Image: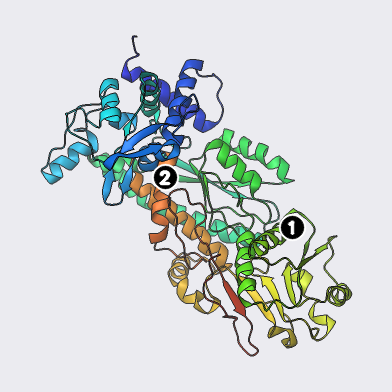
Amino acid sequence: MRRAPMRTVQRALAGLALLLAQGASATEPPAAVLASHLAGQSIYRDGLLASGEPVRAVVQQGVALSGADAACVQCHRRSGLGGSEGLTPVRPITGRLLFTASQTGFARRRAVATGVADARPAYTRASLARALREGIDPTGRVLDAQMPRYALGDAEIDQLYAYLAGLSAAAAPGVSDGEIHFATIIAPGVEADRRRAQLDVLQAFFRDKNGGTRKEARRREAGSEQMYLAYRTWVLHVWELDGPPETWHDQLAAHYREQPVFAVIGGLGSGSWQPVHAFCEKTGVPCVLPDVDYPVAEGAGYSSLYFSRGIALEADVLAGQLAETRSGMGTIVQVFRDDATGRLPAQALRSALKKKGIEDLADYPVSGADALSSGAWSALLRDANPATLVIWLPPADVQNLAATGTPPAGLQVVYLSASLFAMRHAGLADGWLDRLRMVYPFALPANRERHLARLNAWLRARNIPLADARTQANAYFAATVTGDALAHIGENFSRDYFIERIEQMAETALSPSIYPHLSLGPGQRFASRGGYILGFPQGATTPVPVSDWLIP
């Protein structure tokens, strides 16, 4: 069977990869090319053959691998640009690097710098098959024992060969020779102060970044150093949404058609983020750390990375606290708005408590748009007779609770949500404070000034007023981790590689966010995983922790 030349295959697959990344095309790719790409992708990412049977392989000491455990993505990552497996470096296997001699580009410069030549000829279809089946590279050297030896037929070799040819072969949409485009997304209902706080930070960060880029561009033009070819001018687009959530996808698609972006940085939402999440997953646009309380927590996908699970995380932290501290006497009552966002934490708390064997939980959904009156609170406290009161409501609904008088004798503790209260004091009278607790997934109030000192110095140097600490800190962290990741991907403007770098670098980022502990890893999509329980001692100027950092 006569095969197409390697360059033709690379061009075809690179074009297909670009079409898939854009999510749409005026011209459909040939059916055979698409089928081969999808079959190769299934082998690479999922460890499944086109028949649905698992890929089988043997690794060091004869250990058998099957299915997802044998998938190439386990070590070479989704981008194909590698990384490390313990102390062992995992080499890139994208087509433009695998199917060319290693003594080119970066490898040649590395050999000159170290004095050690590490040349090999370009892989061909035949030498790729031998490497996969027997673990022998084109020079005849035996590959590392951690490289699996695969049981693949000729058809599967062809499919994987074609897939690798197009893997990370073309710059992602939103990248030109001189510019790289980003968006930030602002959903309806976001307060004007939060919007301004985020945009002030992002716009100042972009100005700083582009000031440095102009200098590097001049250095590039003055010489032939390849290291400066990766520099681009950053361009920020503000995608503001309006109307009901079911219309957001079409609005985002229109923005994207007008100007594709490489990634979304930050973003603000006051309710469900699901339509934005779905758009980013469909188009493959990385959505880097939006500042939202209602992310998609179940089956989070690949392209969206979040600070935390938001309100759902608070519910899980609270469930752990209740299981540890509750004596088993009395009923837990939770009050929430009877809408999609209100029901979410209530359902999460019920589910988490059930797993811990606690089922005496009563729900009090609140209907209508008006804030709860003192009369409504009095009736609730009288009828429900709670021992523990959990309030999934904003301050406007809670302000009349203290007007009911002193707390009922049977009410032992009241829990509030820091996210719904914007991390502020509850404003209840002293008689309630000794029973008040707040679920708090952020850096402790007493430590915040020290925790955010570096950010606050950066803001003052740029004449940006200190405003919403959470919004400013999280926007700065999202922008900084984006810049750090791009600084390490060189000319490989692959969205998958960009995400992989963020996964690796989030924990070591020097810039603070409002969260005290952040880390990511392969496949992890929530960087903060715990929270404190705060108390409100009478006479104290700030709430204090009554628990350690709790990870449910």
Extreme-bottom residue of the structure: 539
Q: CA distance from mark 2 to mark 1?
A: 35 Å
Q: Amino acid at mark 2?
A: Phe
x, y percentage for residue 141? 17, 33
Residue at 44% of width from left, 66% of height from top?
Answer: 458
* Of 66 and 336, the residue lying toward us: 66
The amino acid type of the residue labelled 1 equals: Arg
Classify mark 2: helix, strand or loop. helix
Q: Secondary structure at mark 1?
A: helix
510 up-or-down from 257: above or below: below
Residue 508's place in the image compared with 544, above or below, is: above
Rendered image: mark on residue 498: 2
Q: Are marks 2 and 1 in contact (CB under 8 Å)?
A: no
- Look at 52% across and 72% down and name the residue there: 549
Q: Is residue 16 visible?
A: no
Which of the two residues, 76 or 448, is positioned nearer the viewer here? Answer: 76
- Mark 1 highlights which residue? 343
Q: Quadrant of residue 58?
A: top left
Which quarter of the image is occupied by the N terminus? top left
Q: Earlier in the sequence, mark 2 or mark 1?
A: 1
Residue closest to the far top: 1
How busy is the neighbourhood of tag 1: few (under 14 within 10 Å), some, or many (20 plus)? some
Measured from the top left, where is residue 257 in percent x and y?
A: 58, 33
Residue 304 shows up from this direction: yes
